[in-house]
Image (tube, rainbow, N blue to C red):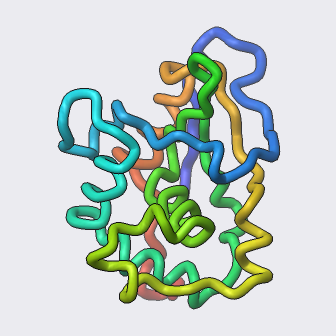
Amino acid sequence: MCVFFILNVGVSKMFKMADVSTLDLHLDESNPRFWVNVNPSQEDIMKYMINHEKLLVLANSITNMNTLLPGERVIIFKDGGENIVLEGNRRTCVYQMLLNRELIPAEIRTAFPVAKDEFLKEISKISVDVVNNRQEAMTFLAARHIVGVEKWSSVTK
């Protein structure tokens, strides 16, 4: 049995959906999973994910599927005019590198997969969930990363 719950954080609507340019998304410099310099650049975050977060494996998986995953929207909030990615930094990074190969560090550029044109068109603008601020998203992020997605039993598989 899978049980989901949402804590009441005092707002009437937690998020809205929007379509945004993938290259206009800003990787989260405060993501607790990234152990990078204080005030890291977007390039620092990308290099960290390549070296520590199996980004090349994810890039190959994504390009082999050749489509966005249903039900896996990126979660963002707006901060100072930037669209900060709270959930989906790895996917966003892969999408951005597929769209702009200059973002891929030279040492792995030839190993990084090349996406088909129709997939590049699909990921150039994606639907995202927009929350009002980082605190509102914490309920969802905690449920996903701490509690986790319920695994199927052996019988169900």
Residue visible at 54% across and 56% down in the picture: 92
Q: Position of residue 125 (x, y in %)?
A: 77, 56
Q: Position of residue 70 (x, y in %)?
A: 72, 67
Please indicate whether residue 52 sits to the left or right of residue 54 in the image: left
Question: Total of numbered circles in the picture?
Answer: 0
In the rendered image, the vertical position of residue 12 relative to residue 106, given as above or below: above
Q: Position of residue 51 (x, y in %)?
A: 22, 66
- Please state, as top left, top right, bottom left or bottom right, where the N terminus lies in the image: bottom right
Residue 40 lies in quadrant: top left
Residue visible at 69% across and 12% down in the picture: 11
Foreground of the two, 88 or 56: 56
Q: Residue 81: in sight, yes or no?
A: yes
Foreground of the two, 11 or 7: 11
Residue visible at 30% across and 66% down in the picture: 50
Please indicate whether residue 24 sits to the left or right of residue 53 in the image: right
Residue 29 lies in quadrant: top left
Residue visible at 36% across and 55% down in the picture: 46
Q: Position of residue 122 (x, y in %)?
A: 78, 70
In the rendered image, the vertical position of residue 79 relative to residue 124, given as above or below: above
Q: Residue 1: in sight, yes or no?
A: no
Task: Single out the residue that lies furthest toward the top.
Answer: 10
